[in-house]
Image (cartoon, rainbow, N blue to C red):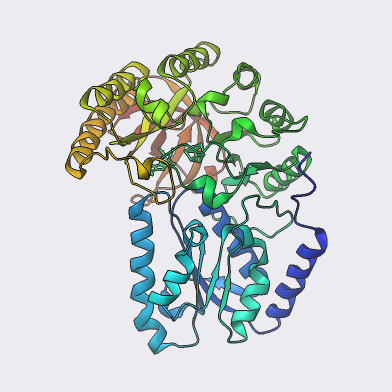
Amino acid sequence: MADLNLLVPEDEIEKQKEYMARIATFGGGKYKINTYGCQMNEHDSEVLAGMLEQMGYNATSDDEEADVILYNTCCVRDNAERRAAGNIGILAGLKKRKPGVIIGVCGCMMQEQGAAENLLKLRPYVNLIFGTHNLHKFPELFYTALQGKKVKVIEQNDQGCIPEGLPIARKNPITGYLTIMYGCNNFCSYCIVPYVRGRERSRSIASIVKEAEEMAKTGISEIMLLGQNVNSFGLGSEESFPKLLHELDGVVPRLRFMTSHPKDLSDALIEEMAVSKTVCPQFHLPVQSGSDRILSEMNRRYDREHYLNRVAMLRQAIPNVGLTTDIIAGFPGETEQDFEDTLSLVKEVRYDGAFTFIYSPRVGTGAAAMENQVPEEVKHERLSRLIALQDEITKEQLSGQVGSVQEVLIEGLSKRQNDAVYGRTGRGMTVNCKGKEEWIGHILPVSITDAGSNTLRGEIITKE
Ligand code: 5AD
Ligand code: SF4
């Protein structure tokens, strides 16, 4: 069961629905949402889009045409913050030409201490500011902004809430996101997420299954379950992540999930994955560093041996499992030897792919206050070496698939060729092949013929 105290009360959701209905009578307009950061943010934007569409607004990709422009921001690294701030700055001209346009800024960056005030000082033309804990109140806040008032609502409460029953406008008709939990309790020393997303809280299995069934009815073939730390789903209740996967087995043809924390990756989860008909043989398991000393400074609460043991268990139980990871280069105090430990771990695990980042100090986190920060040029040089190594391994992993037959979910038409389609294997590798539009949404056997540096080529095996 989800924690009932954290559920947004039904009458609050009803109130927001009333605001949506009221705004819908105003005649509607066009909206544009700019999203930064992770899948969680992308999905939050789908909820904002769902609410806007109920209010009679249609999507546009053109700022000039939009009546409301939202920025759903990220603060996990400095470059995401800078990009959002820069783009909001560019809107000054538009706002002068079109004073009626409503500019809203929301998401993680707005939850940072003092960020909303700074933004308003710098960009006084922003009409509407709200944080991650107020997403469900968007209709009410938007209504106030439409009345010509400035709105700034940020709750710095750590606990957070669980909103249920909001409309969602999903971007992709074949693959869809489903949030199963919110927040994070881990406080890795480099990470701002626990400060801006609040404490871990899980939805109930019943409400998740219901949403997955509704997604299946609309034709979605693959669901990506989202949470900052899915392995601790259901913490403090009878529910657990393996139980959830069990209940979801067969609801849609394919399930994936992210993100897993290596310290919480249980044998029970690996066993459930091994027997599930639905969960894809893909595992995103962020390692962050291969050095025990750095892992401890990062407060990751596992060591290299534990991590490699989890990898071995996964590979034993799920043959052909593809592993991906996140790695940070240049954490404070990282020596050349520490970094070489990371490279050696990457060589040992042989990931299909890795998201690699330069360490970015985040104000208020433990690591930002550490004295032994690594110089920028050293961080960049390490990142380049890491990327070069992983690119080589990715290519080899892709080549290893040539000659095999893979089940591929056809996801869309190729952008370059109109008689070609693309899709993904269970392991998560992208495949391009000749194909027809009517095959989109189907899982078809594909004979893999070639491998490039990021994708595969293949031929769909048809009966004709
Ligand atoms: N600097 C660089 N990378 C970071 N990440 C999180 N915080 C930081 C930071 N301060 C990375 C981690 C995490 C991913 C989502 O972002 O690798 O797994
Ligand atoms: Fe950040 Fe660590 Fe939580 Fe992931 S597990 S969101 S890296 S604090």
Residue found at the very far top of the displayed protein: 316
Q: Quadrant of residue 394?
A: top left
Residue 293 in view, yes or no? yes
241, 339: nearer the viewer:
339
Q: Residue at x 62, y 86 (%)?
A: 147
Q: Residue at x 64, y 75 (%)?
A: 56
**In the rendered image, the vertical position of residue 434 relative to residue 349, given as above or below:** below
Out of 138 and 34, give the one closest to the viewer: 138
Residue for point 74% across, 40% down = 209
Residue 343 appears at what percent x and percent y? 27, 23
Nearest to the observer: residue 155 or residue 323:
155
Left or right? Give the position of 62 relative to 209.
left
**Splitting the image into 4 quarters, where does residue 434 fall?**
top left
The picture places residue 62, in percent across and down from the top left corner, at 42, 73
- The location of residue 22, given as percent across then percent down, is 73, 79
- Number of marks drawn: 0
Judged left or right of residue 435, residue 89 is: left
Residue at x 24% of width, y 36% of height: 383
Q: Residue 71: image x %, image y %?
A: 47, 66
Asked if residue 224 lies left or right of residue 32, the reply is right
| Quarter the N terminus occupies | top right
Is residue 407 toward the left or the right of residue 430 in the image? right
Task: Give the answer, above or below, for where 369 lies relative to 459.
Answer: below
Q: Is residue 172 in sight in this rendering?
A: no
